[in-house]
Structure formats: C-alpha cells, structure tokens
Amino acid sequence: MDSDVIIIGAGAAGLMCGAVAGQNGASVILLDHAERAGEKIRISGGGRCNFTNLYCGPDNFISQNPHFAKSALSRYTQYDFLELVERYGIKWHEKTKGQLFCDGRSQEIIDMLLAECSTAGNEIRLGTQVLGVEKIGDGFVVTTPTQTLATRALVIACGGPSIPKMGATGYGYKVAEQFGLNVITPEPALVPLTFTDQLKEPIAALSGMSVDTVVSNERASFDEALLFTHRGLSGPAILQISSYWHSGEAITVNMAPGRDALAELKTAKLQTPKLSPEKWLMSHLPARLAAHLAAQFPFQRLADMPDRELINLALQISAWHIRPAGTEGYRKAEVTRGGVDTDELSSKTMESRKVAGLYFIGEVVDVTGHLGGHNFQWAWASGAACGDALAAQPISGARR
C-alpha cells in the first residue's frame, strides 16, 4: 500500500480529515487538481472566511434525512474549531447572527489547516488529476497521469460543481454512481435568483440597492437583507431562500418586516392627507425604491387613494409576490444542494454502507448548510468524523 488513506480533494473537509486521521496514526495522501489547497476557503467571506457560526446546529441544514448531520455536528462543534483557530493565534470577530470571520485574510485558515496536515505527516499533491479509481481486494487503486496509487481507504472530499471557474466539478458524484450509490440530483444553492425579461427591465433601475426584508415561501422564511441586481435579486435573504426554492415556484418579499403597512397607510391618510404616496414611501424605504413603487400608483395625495389602492400599495411593500425565472446557476452558487444520498452512508463515520473503505465528506454529501459559516462547520465536522473513523481502522503498514 502507498498509504492508509487517499483523500481526493484538498479543500475544507479533505484537509480536516487528513489532519485528524494523520495525527491519530494513519498515513495520508491528499490529491487535488487545483494548484492551491483550500480555494473555496480563500475566496469565502469576501476573503476573510466566515469559518463557522456560533449558533450552528442541525436545523441549519437541508437534507432528505434531516437527522443525518446530527452525529458529526455534535462530536465536532463550532467551539472545537474555534479552539483550533485560537490555538493558532488567528484573530476573529463576530458579525450578525453568530457568523465568525477572520480579522485578517482567509489564508490564515488555510495555513492553519496545512500546518495541521504537516504535523500529521500528510502528503499533499496539488495539480494532480485523478483519472479513475477502482476497488481492488480490501483496498482501492487511484490512477493519476503519472502513477497508480494503492490505499486501504478512499475518501471523496472534492465537493460539488458550484463555482466552476475554480475548477469545481461533479467528479464525486461520478465516483458514487460508479460504486452503485444513489445521488440526490444536485442543484445550485445559496445562489441569486433571476427575473424574466418583462420584470427584469423595470427592476434593473434599482440595481445595487439593498433593503431589509423577510423573504419566504411554503418551506422557509429568512429575515435578512435583499439586494437588487441587473438580472434579479441577491443578498443574504435571497441566497438563503434559494436553497428552498424550486423552479416555477413563487416567493414572497416583505420590505416592511415587523410593521403593518396598511394600518400605517390608513393612519397617514387621516393625519397627513396631502402627503404624496412617494413621500410617505420615502420615510420607510430607500428613495429609488420609493419612487419605483409610487410610479405604479397615479395619485398625488394619500387623500385621493381609495382603500383598495391603499391595500394594493401595502401589498407591494409587505407581500410582494414574485415568480423568479431561475437562478444564476453554478457559476454564482456558493454551494450545491443534493449530492450523495445520506441513506448510503454511516452518520458516525461517513463510510459507504455498500463499499467498505469508501467515504464521502463535505459538500459532496446531501447536506447543505444555511448561509453564514454553516457549510464550513459541516466540512470540519464531517471531516473530523471521517478522520477519527479512519484512524480507528487497523494500520496497513503503508509507507510513511
């Protein structure tokens, strides 16, 4: 054997898995076709890496089996990763909703993980394409353009196809299907939504403007900011709801969260009847948005608006019902929804139930986190769970 473990993918989950397995005695080789390790870590959080979330828990994840993530998340928590960050002297700060970011650059997190892998004796081979994998006896053979490697255990940690400009592919799904594992159809998640041309043109004038909202559909609701774009909608609220959105469905946008817009309009009509709808809107919303909404109501004064028009205006503010045309796709998606069916894996070890020694961790699995550091915490937790399991296996006497 060339190693006890080969990990395909030197991203967040792969590096964590390699470090844990190696520090517990297993020999590990990590392979990645990218020229640098941890590329998604590097670009995350605007280059500062939203590395975890203080409030991370099973409810922050989407999966066909909502219980699957509980085991790994409970055994390697956000506080465990935070302890590692602090041990390396990395300064951090908390933003809204428990999101933790580096004070400096995200490269600090990558360097920390690489240092952990170095301490563990991991061998990391970058710029190395995997041409194929095979099950041979009690182990696996991994073929690259220059050699064939034998290993006791094989870990698939190469993520999903989100952000293809960084070289992301669906290779992990191909390996799963090769070995007879079911794959839940992958889709872009945490992704901006687009409009039809008919709606896109009038909304394009609002591009770049942000407003606090509650965005919801039949399955979820998120109280966060919305951003208008030239093609549709983005911002945290939209990215969040996109993970729960299916093609052809509508979403509802409330731009007056916590307020009764109709009651306020009726009061304003009585108390300030000469006030124009636009002026009233400008006291609650950004000026460009107020002008856009007011243009749909040809009234100079609130006093001139019958109740049905007040209702319509209130609905435009607090219950804007829209049907997106689609999403920006994998090129703008932060993660991938779907992936290797969790029914195929052990929740404690991440090992395939069908193929001994084959493991899947991180984004390639059908576990998708909310925005705000949750997907990284899943990478750390699933990687640690797998690393612990690998270290517990009998050592093969592989070359160290």
Image (spheres, grey):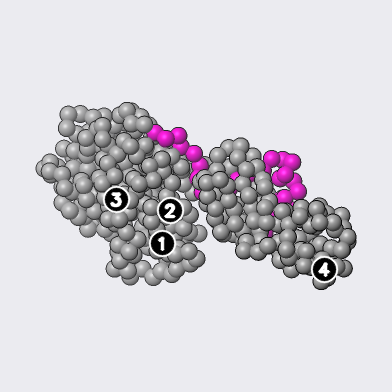
Q: Kindly state the secondary structure of the residue where label 2 is placed.
A: helix
User: Camera-side residue: 164 or 382?
Assistant: 382
Q: Earlier in the sequence, mark 3 or mark 4?
A: 3
Q: Residue at coordinates 76% horizontally, 52% vertically from top-left? A: 312
Rendering coords of residue 52 (x, y %): 40, 60
Q: Which mark is residue 60?
A: 2
Residue 184: within the magenta? yes
Mark 3 vs mark 4: in front? 4
Residue 101: within the magenta? no
Report the residue marked by disc 1. 55
Q: Which mark is residue 270?
A: 4
Q: Are marks 1 and 3 in contact (CB under 8 Å)?
A: no
Determine the CA span between mark 1 and mark 3. Answer: 16 Å
Q: Is residue 358 left or right of residue 174?
A: left
Determine the CA span between mark 3 and mark 4. Answer: 58 Å
- The residue under label 1 is which amino acid type? Tyr
Q: Kindly state the secondary structure of the residue where label 3 is placed.
A: helix
Rendering coords of residue 161 (x, y %): 45, 40
Q: Earlier in the sequence, mark 4 or mark 2?
A: 2
